[in-house]
Amino acid sequence: MKKLLALVLTLCLALGVSLASAETFKMGIDPEYDPFSYMGNDGDYTGFDVAVCKAACELAGLEWEAVPVDWDFKLQMLDAKDVDCVWSGMTIKQSMIDAGYVLSAPYYESWQVLVVRADSGIETSADLAGKVVAVQLGTSGQDLLEGDLTDLSSTFSALTTLSSFNLCFKELEGNAADAVFVDFPVAEKYVAEHPELKILDEKLGFEEYGICFRKDDTELCKKIEDAVAELVASGKYAEIAAEYPNIVDNLIFLKNAE
């Protein structure tokens, strides 16, 4: 009898561990994508997307976990089930849809900009002829410069690709690059804290952010979207957004609620 009870207890514990694992929602993030996802001063991941995901997981009855990803290999990590979604200011691309990934409804409108040193004398993208421009690997910015904006990038002396926006900005600040091609909300936040830099007055490559799930994960996508819709309806979504004022105006769910 004791052996039987021990066996039952072991099975129950094993089942409990399995269920706990199944209920953990692993959010794939770019850990240096302020204000959407980044590490706070307390050593924990924070940001608008992180806060919304945590609140949505609470409503959906899921345990939340943030998993930093190499942005250039984000979809490979998703396919390998290292994460359950990619949710970090991620541009919705037609190539993802064509490949069969499940994409949420878009929640943010953005565009690409060029950041330069304020004393550089560079005023427009035309002034970057013969200059070095840095961009993050795996981003829509890289896709644009290597695709629709090749007429522009072909004038550069070099296009430097790096693993994070922070590294791109360090190249700019160290005079190893003359400009950084980057999403507007990230540029705006960074430049506000680094007045020696400025954003050129050109909007390039309009895009929308969404959440990417694996093929056939339509139920999980709907579960998260329903939880986010509940956050919007309750006002919690707007409350979270208020903590990140530079992105509020371009949040689609809040614009649609007006």
Image (cartoon, rainbow, N blue to C red):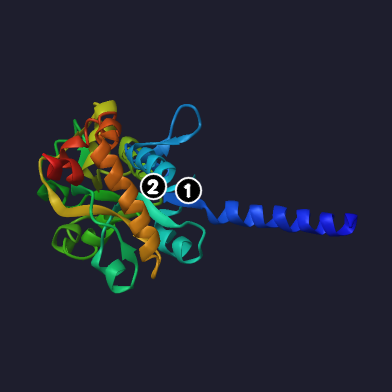
Q: Residue at x 34, y 67 (%)?
A: 101
Residue 89 visible at all: no
Residue 32 visible at all: yes
Q: Is residue 254 left or right of residue 221?
A: left
Compared to residue 114, the image places residue 94 above or below, namely below
- Mark pair 2, 1: CA separation: 29 Å
Q: Residue at x 18, y 48 (%)?
A: 109
Q: Which residue is mark 1?
A: 62
Compared to residue 232, the image places residue 96 above or below, namely below
Q: Is residue 44 left or right of residue 167?
A: right
Q: Earlier in the sequence, mark 2 or mark 1?
A: 1
Mark 1: few/some/many CA within 10 Å (<14, 14-19, 20+): some
Amino acid type at mark 2:
Ser
- Which image quarter: residue 178? top left
Identify the secondary structure beneath mark 1: loop
- Which image quarter: residue 184? top left
Q: Position of residue 235 (x, y in %)?
A: 25, 34
Q: Which residue is mark 2?
A: 164
Q: Residue at x 18, y 46 (%)?
A: 252
User: Residue 196 or 26: which is nearer the viewer?
Assistant: 26
- Which image quarter: residue 254? top left
Q: Nearer the viewer, mark 2 or mark 1?
A: 1
User: Residue 251 or 75: which is nearer the viewer?
Assistant: 251
Q: Position of residue 6 (x, y in %)?
A: 83, 54
Please identify the residue farthest to the right as the structure is shown: 2
